[in-house]
Structure formats: C-alpha cells, structure tokens
Image: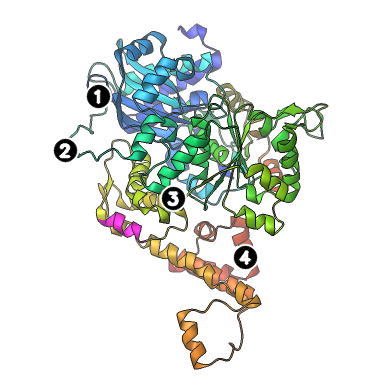
Amino acid sequence: MTASEFDPLDLQLLYGVAVGFVGDADPVMAQRHALLSAMGACAARWSLLYRRARGEEYRLDGRRGAEMAAPERFKISARIEAMLMKHGSLTLARSLSARRDLIKAAGLPAEAAIVVPCRDNGRVTGLLVLGSRLFGDPYRERDELVLAEIGALTARALFPARDGGPHAIPETNAPSKRVPRRPETQADQIRRRHPALQTLIGHSPAIVAVMQDILAYADSQHPVLIHGETGTGKDLVARALHDQGPRRRYPFETVNCVALPEGLAESALFGHRQGAFTGADRYQKGQFELAGRGSLFLDELGDLPLSQQAKLLLVLQENKFRPIGAESSLRFEARILVATHRNLVEEVRSKRFREDLFYRVYGLTISVPPLRQRLEDLPDLVDHFIALNRAPGQRMQASDAFLADLARDDFRGNIRQLRWAVIRAMVRCGHGRRLLPEHLDGDLARLSELHAAPIQEPVVPSVAPAAPTADSRREESASAAPPAKLPNYEGVLRAYLMDVLRLTNGNITQAQHVMQKPRTTVQEMVRKFDLNAFVAECRRRR
Amino acid sequence: MLSFPVDLTADAEDAMSPRVGEVFEPPPTALVLDLSPVRLLTTAGAGLLISFIEVARGRGIPVYLAGAGPKILGILHRIGIAPPRVLEQPDVAEALEHAARAS
C-alpha cells in the first residue's frame, strides 16, 4: 500500500508510530510503544507481542490491556504463516480455519480477533495478536491496513530479520532447566477443549464445578444468575458464558447496576431519540440496543434501585423496550446474564428486590466459590498475576514460603485482594526473582485486622445482645449485670474510622479501599467526626 | 477524574498506569477523563487511554471524555472511540457536574 492510499489522518498516526520507534533508544520502551500503538490504532481491548524463537515457535514478549490468559509460547503452521505473509493480517472472524489453528490448536485466547505479522525482509519475525475492539465492533479494512504497517515497523525496530536492528532485544527466555510437567488435570482438559474458559484459573473441584456449569448453560437462551462474594470473578464467568455460547459473535454489554446514574438510567439503558429531551441533540443507542443479539450482563443486580427494577421487569416480560422519545418499541434479543453478591431471596423477603423480577432472572444459577474455599488454586492464581504484571523479559516466581504465608489468610476480598497482594509484593521484590514472605510486609495481617473491625461494630448490641465471646462469657460469669453503658453507633463508627486511618497512615485512598466506601463518604466521615487533625497526625507519623 | 499529560504518548505509561488501582478501587460511579491539557495524541497514547476505558467498560462505569480539542477528538473518532459508547463534554467542569448529577 502506498502512502497516497491512506487517509491523511491515518498517515499522520503512522508517522507518529514510526517516530516513536526512532525516538526510543531503549528496547523495552520500543516494545511498549509497539504494544500500545497496536491497541490504540484500532481501539483493541488488549495486545500481545510474540517474537519468533526457533522454527515455528513464537514466545510471548509483552502484553498490554485487559487481562486474559495467553500462552507463553506456541507454534503456527506453515499454512498460517503463508496466509499471514499473503494478507498482512488475519481477521479470525473471517477465517474459520485460521481460528481453528490459532485458538484451538495453538491456544491463543478465545477472544483473539486479529493476528498481525511483524514482517521484515520477507520473513515473519514476530506476531501482534489483538483482542476484540473496545465496543465489540468488527475490525475495519482501514484497521487491517494500519495494523499491517505497525507490524512492519515493529519488526524493523524489534525483530529485524538480520541482526543489528535498532532495538533487537537479546533473547532472555531461552530454556535453561526443564521444568517437570505436572499431569494434566480435569480443569486443564476443559480449558484445552474450550478456550473460552481459559480465563478461569485453577484446578480445584470448586472451579471445575463452575466450568461444568458454564459448559452446561452456554448454549441455553435462559437467563443465568451468577452468585458469589465480591471479588470472586463473577464478571469473568459471565464473559466465559458469552464466549462459549452461540452469541459470541455478537456484543457483550455490561451494565453495572451500582454505577447506574439514577437520573440517566433510562437513557443509558434504553437510549433516546434526537430531541427527546433538552440536550438530546442526537440519536443515542442504549445498552439494551447495543447488546443486539449478544449478551447483556447486569452486574450487581441486587443493588438496582426499585424504580429501575420495575422498568427492567417490563422489558424482560415483553422482550421489547422503547428508547426515550421513540414512537415504537424495539425488540430485545440479547441473553440476560446477571450477577450479585447479595442473597436475592433475603432481598426479596426484605422488600428490597421485586419478587416478580426475581423469578424472571432466577433461572439457571452458578455459584462462584470464595477464594478461601479453593485455596489449592492459590499457586496457579499467583503465577497468573505474576505473569500479567511482570516487566517484559523479567523472570519471577513465588517461593513456597510466600505461598504458605498467603494461604494463611482468609481472603475476604477474594481474588481482587490476592491480586493486589501479589502486585504489591512484586513491587517490593523489585528486580528480584523470587517472591518471599517479607515481600508481603504484613499486608495480610493488616487487612485481616481491618476486616475484623466491623465485626465489633455495635449495631447489633444497640438492638439485641451480641453473641457471647469467650471473654464476654468470662465476664458474665463474674457478674451477670449488663454493661453499664453500651457504646453508641456513631462512637464506634468513629473509633473504627480512626483505626483504619491509623493503619493506613492517614491515606484516604487506602482507607476507602479497606472500608469499601466511596472516597467522598470517607472524606465526609472525616469531616463529620472532626478527624482532619487526626488524619494529619497519622500522615506525620508515617 | 483522571488528567492526562500534554504529550499523551507511550512515555506517559509510567505515570498513568499506577493510577488504575487508585481510580477504580473502589469503583467510581463515573469516570471523567480530563483531556484538556493534551496537545499531542499518538496511537500509543490512545492505547493508554483505551486501557482505562476498558476497565471502566468492564465494570459498566460510564466514561466522559472531557475538554478534548477538535484534533484530539478527530483522532479518537477515527480509531473508534466515539459517542454513544463514551460521553463527550467540551468542558471539564461541566463533565464533572454531569457525572456528579448522574451518580
């Protein structure tokens, strides 16, 4: 393709990519530039960069964007290589045979959408693999052309066919010691046969049960209710259900019911026509329409306000919805997937969740186990997070002592908590190769202490006696008289906030994370309880 | 709200990436990306921007692109980041107000 055939804006963007490679003397920076440029050129959700090692083998060199399981190495056939050379890229939605070879056989992520060769001097020396586009739109011809150029620029900068390219990175991952392979588990077999489930990490019976549920429900059209504690990965289960089922070629739209803006909820969900209200200057599709024939994932449905529940119920009953200002209704064709950490039965009983809506969504259910019930998956999960977060070329692994220390925690924050514990440990480990217990630096003990704090919250004592503890039983035996004065709710809330601030050295960001409250709420509590001076004092002591 | 630097290129990653944890834990009700300082946007910079939008989108959090000049918006539209999937507000203060009202 000649320069004159490109759109002027694309030409300008490609010029920026080329300049970026010239300007970056550091190969690691050049690699970062390649990965981010490929993502940014066509709004891809993620990018992977593989370098050609020996023969047809490609090794993972770097990654950016959304987290997903990707093979460290894979081989491609001569046929695929010839296709890459011929076309300059392979859009997997258009080539079933390439999809079969690269996803089913080579093990690339099921969500891989396009493979771009890094070509130099007539040879494929690397591969850029990109996920689907950010909003589920298909790759355009323009994207393929721009990406082919970025692939060529990347090859020349990072993987030149002849030695001596500007940023040729010495191969650091050459196999040194052969690691004994563990026998294939049932979970491995499922992941091998069904690549859409590769995002589910672990081998425990609990995670295998989740995988089996996904396989059983993927082809059904009925709603699925995914239940599990916060941080267990309910969104990954929903995504796997979509990717495994017949709707995978259509969009996957997520609605976070907690974040749904009250005033704009109807417009966000159902869309609006031009002129429907002041400021509606153009037609805007809502998420029900954007989902098309794909899947609509209603995350944290248990938190949806009652007013919105009624509107959602109507859509589910009639399978149609009307955008604001529209004269006619549109047919709703997507499959509904819902997730919640709440006990919906209890919510119905407490009149916080509509019973009729409950029976609309309470069809097939998948229960995602908390991490403490699948601690045998800890090593796999830790390896996964290390692989996702390590620097390009960096080799790092968790020591047995590190894993043993981790396993002592009860992980109330589940996998999200584990992820941050591993990332923090990696930061503390710096350029080291092994994560050790000292890299946890009391993280878990601190969190356990903080998580334990709300249990002492005297909301219960103010209405009913608390369950007796060993200490309280001893006290009772000494004196049966009730305590002279029970602490009031606000007093204990203030004490709890002070504890959190003390342990987080007055860092509001960390405090809000621990308390699982919005930042503004924590700031408001600090103001209300007159703790500004206390915060400053905690920061000084840091 | 998250502000981006004057030159939004691959070099901005070191400064911006650590902010993912800060911005999304706990999840906000809306994410306002302040693009008013940005004068240079490369495809790599757009990739960085996408990584934030992707996290927000995965959690169903509405994203406001605020204060972007016409050149920057032109690039974003070209690569495929455009309404209705993201909300655009020419003025950052208005975007914040809008996001606050919406929550």
Range of magenta residues: A401-408
Separation of residues labelled 2 and 3 (CA atoms) = 31 Å
Residue bearing mark 2: A177
Residue bearing mark 1: A53
Q: Earlier in the sequence, mark 4 or mark 2?
A: 2
Q: Is residue A458 visible?
A: yes
Separation of residues labelled 4 and 3 (CA atoms) = 28 Å
Q: Residues within 10 Å of mark 2 (few under 14, many from 20)?
A: few
Q: Both on one chain, marks 4 and 3?
A: yes
Q: Residue at x 39, y 52 (%)?
A: A374
Reply yes or no: does residue A244 show up in magenta: no
Question: Of A513 and A379, which appears nearest the observer?
Answer: A379
Q: Residue at x 45, y 7 (%)?
A: A1
Q: Is residue A337 left or right of residue A270?
A: left
Q: Amino acid at mark 1?
A: Ala
Question: Which mark, residue A415?
Answer: 3
